Image: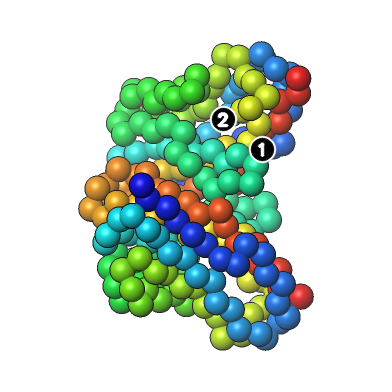
Amino acid sequence: SQTIHQWPATLVQPVGSPLSLECTVEGTSNPNLYWYRQAAGRGLQLLFYSVGIGQISSEVPQNLSASRPQDRQFILSSKKLLLSDSGFYLCAWAWGGANTGELFFGEGSRLTVL
Amino acid sequence: GNSVTQMEGPVTLSEEAFLTINCTYTATGYPSLFWYVQYPGEGLQLLLKATKADDKGSNKGFEATYRKETTSFHLEKGSVQVSDSAVYFCALSDPNFGNEKLTFGTGTRLTIIP
């Protein structure tokens, strides 16, 4: 069976510090991978998606970046966090090329920037 | 661009009450429509979907019908249970990217009281 792991679950960081959130998927190969963010009172906003190693599409210009160094690993990073980066970050995967619309989500990482 | 507007929460109902959570959308082309649910402490999971006009998605007693004329996909359940307490997200796909880029609504928190 397939599983998705996302960590850390919670993170409190000062403004200007770096960020690294990691997501790994097990039990499948060549998945599509996604990073979403949910800010207070807003819907889930797609930040990045990837259809393969080294292939990253950015949806929103921002202070964040993503990388996919391995087939089942997706990393969300920032060099210097802003207060507005606070939120709930969700990693998700989908069967590559299946076009079903079904995403499988991790349990999320809550980031608080102080 | 694509957008999803769903009923503001929170919604509190008594057990066995009838549930409706409204969802309307704006999209170009012919998107697929989805309801995702997030139970406490868990990641989002697909509840049901509909891929074309007049389709009805159903699962776990929940139903939603794809209404193109009113651009709506309202979620309904005839008799809710305490275990239905969760956050519900309406979403649509971007037909220009298969079904794997989803736009989500803000979510509606549902609490069922025994």
Which residue is depicted at the point 42% across and 69% down?
A74
Is A74 in front, or is B74?
A: A74
Choose the circle earlier in sequence order: 2 or 1: 2
- Does residue B17 appear in this view? yes
- The amino acid pointed to by label 2 is Asn
Residue B3 position (above or below residue A11) = above
Q: Chain of mark 2?
A: B
User: Which amino acid does the dot numbered 1 rest on?
Assistant: Arg
- Report the residue marked by disc 1: B109
Secondary structure under badge 1?
Answer: strand
Image quarter for residue B78?
top right
Q: Is residue A99 above or below residue A114?
A: above
Asked which secondary structure carries label 2, the reply is loop
Q: Are marks 2 and 1 in contact (CB under 8 Å)?
A: no
Left or right position of A34 against B86 = left
Depth order, front residue of B74/A86 = A86
- Residue A11 rendering spot, x and y as whole percentages: 67, 69
How busy is the neighbourhood of tag 2: few (under 14 within 10 Å), some, or many (20 plus)? some
